[in-house]
Amino acid sequence: MIGIPLAWAYGHVAEWAIHRWVLHGAGKKRGAPFSFHFHEHHRASRTNNFVDPVYQGSPFQWNAAGKETLALGLLTLAHIPLVPIAPWFTATLFASGVQYYRVHKRSHLDTDWAREHVPWHYDHHMGPDQDANWGVRSDWVDRLMGTRMEYVGTEKEAKDRRRRERRAQPAPAPEVTPDAPRRAA
């Protein structure tokens, strides 16, 4: 049963490390195998007020969500040889992968939910420094490693949200006065 907390901790540390060094390290270079994360997923999130529309479809398409699903599946399969010697560890690791995908998907479909339940992940995408806040399901590894930078609820976030809302509003229609000549339709 010691495998349960060990796998839980291992899953969070692996999530943090992969996000930091693979997805944002090697993945920042365009054309790199994991560049979809930074160049597709981050761009979509910042463009759409944290929503990434690819999560509305099937997780088995060849887009950022589908590639994430494939990577999670391969990482899980890599641990299958441990089943005979550490069944609780591997079961917990599998559950962690499912939880990761569900939390990540929901957060990018429901901005209000994300701001309330996983603010560190919202901070990762929408905050001024996208190279911080690497945890998705929890921020405890970020706090331990000193990479947690809070943004939700700050004056900077309020200012940025007001600016995004102003940009999203359509330009006001020209005012028509009763004396102004009207064009024939």
Image: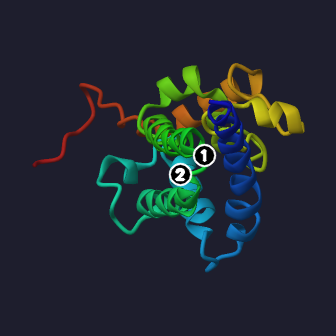
Which residue shows up at 18% across the image and 46% down it?
Answer: 183
Task: Provide residue 119's location: percent of width, then percent of height.
Answer: 64, 27
Q: Gap in Å between the C-alphas at discs 1 and 2?
A: 5 Å
Which residue shows up at 60% across the image and 46% down it?
Answer: 86
Picture layout, residue 131 above or below residue 103: below
The one of 84 and 169 positioned closer to us in this rendering: 84
Residue of label 1: 86
Picture layout, residue 71 above or below residue 92: below
The one of 81 and 75 positioned closer to us in this rendering: 81
Check disc 2 and report its element: helix, strand or loop.
loop
Q: Residue furthest front?
A: 84
Q: Is residue 46 left or right of residue 144?
A: left
Picture layout, residue 171 above or below residue 15: above
Check disc 1 and report its element: helix, strand or loop.
loop
Number of disc labels: 2
Q: Amino acid at mark 2?
A: Val
Residue 109 figure quarter: top left
| Quarter of the image that includes the N terminus | top right
Q: Residue furthest right?
A: 146
Dot 1 and dot 2 residues touching (CB under 8 Å): yes
Q: Is residue 135 visible?
A: no
Which residue shows up at 62% across the image and 39% down it?
Answer: 136
Residue of label 2: 83
